[in-house]
Image (spheres, rainbow, N blue to C red):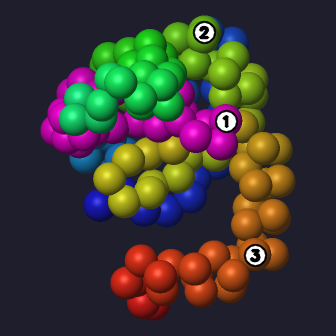
Amino acid sequence: MFMGEYQHSIDDKGRIIIPAKFRDMLGTSFVATRGLDTCLFVYPMEEWGIMEQKLKSLSLMKSDARAFSRFFFSGATECVWDKQGRVNLPGNLRQYAKLDKDCVILGVSNRVEIWNKELWEQYFEQSEETFNEIAEKLVDFNFDL
């Protein structure tokens, strides 16, 4: 399971160092794609396969399913580490997530998220204010803290 929050920088060539314990769990190759909330989602190959199967099961007759699949898959790219343990994120993904210098790398259960630091701080501040309300709503999904 991925968990934790780490501060890192992206260099001028679009390379970023991912925390060592995340690198070990991601394996030698993994998939990065557009995520929700203007961040990147990064999946180990096994988890990517699970996501692919879930998205394949959506009905092509529903426009929302087609739109989400296009959004998710068209931004996906297979990534590998360089010799220094960095990953080179493609320009289209950096642009989508507004990654320019300071980044936050999050472990979120089955995936890693990469955020622009300012966007993460804004998102966290807003979410922190409504955390209790969100937790109450999760009870409706048979989830209890």
What residue appears at the point 47 percent right and 37 percent down from the top-left corner?
41
Precedes in sequence: disc 1 or disc 2: 1
- In which quadrant will I find the N terminus? bottom left
Q: Quadrant of residue 59?
A: top left
Q: Position of residue 62 (x, y in %)?
A: 41, 29
Q: Residues within 10 Å of mark 3 (few under 14, many from 20)?
A: few
Which numbered marker is on residue 91? Answer: 2
Q: Which residue is mark 1?
A: 38
Residue 33 seen = no
Q: What amino acid is found at the position of numbered circle 2 in the picture?
A: Gly
What residue appears at the point 32 percent right and 17 percent down from the top-left corner?
78
Q: Which residue is mark 3?
A: 130
Q: Position of residue 40 (x, y in %)?
A: 54, 34
User: Disc 2 or disc 3, which is closer to the eye?
Assistant: 3
Q: What amino acid is found at the position of numbered circle 3 in the picture?
A: Thr
Q: What amino acid is found at the position of numbered circle 1 in the picture?
A: Thr
Depicted 106 relative to depicted 31: above or below: below
Residue 53 seen = yes
Q: Quadrant of residue 10?
A: top right
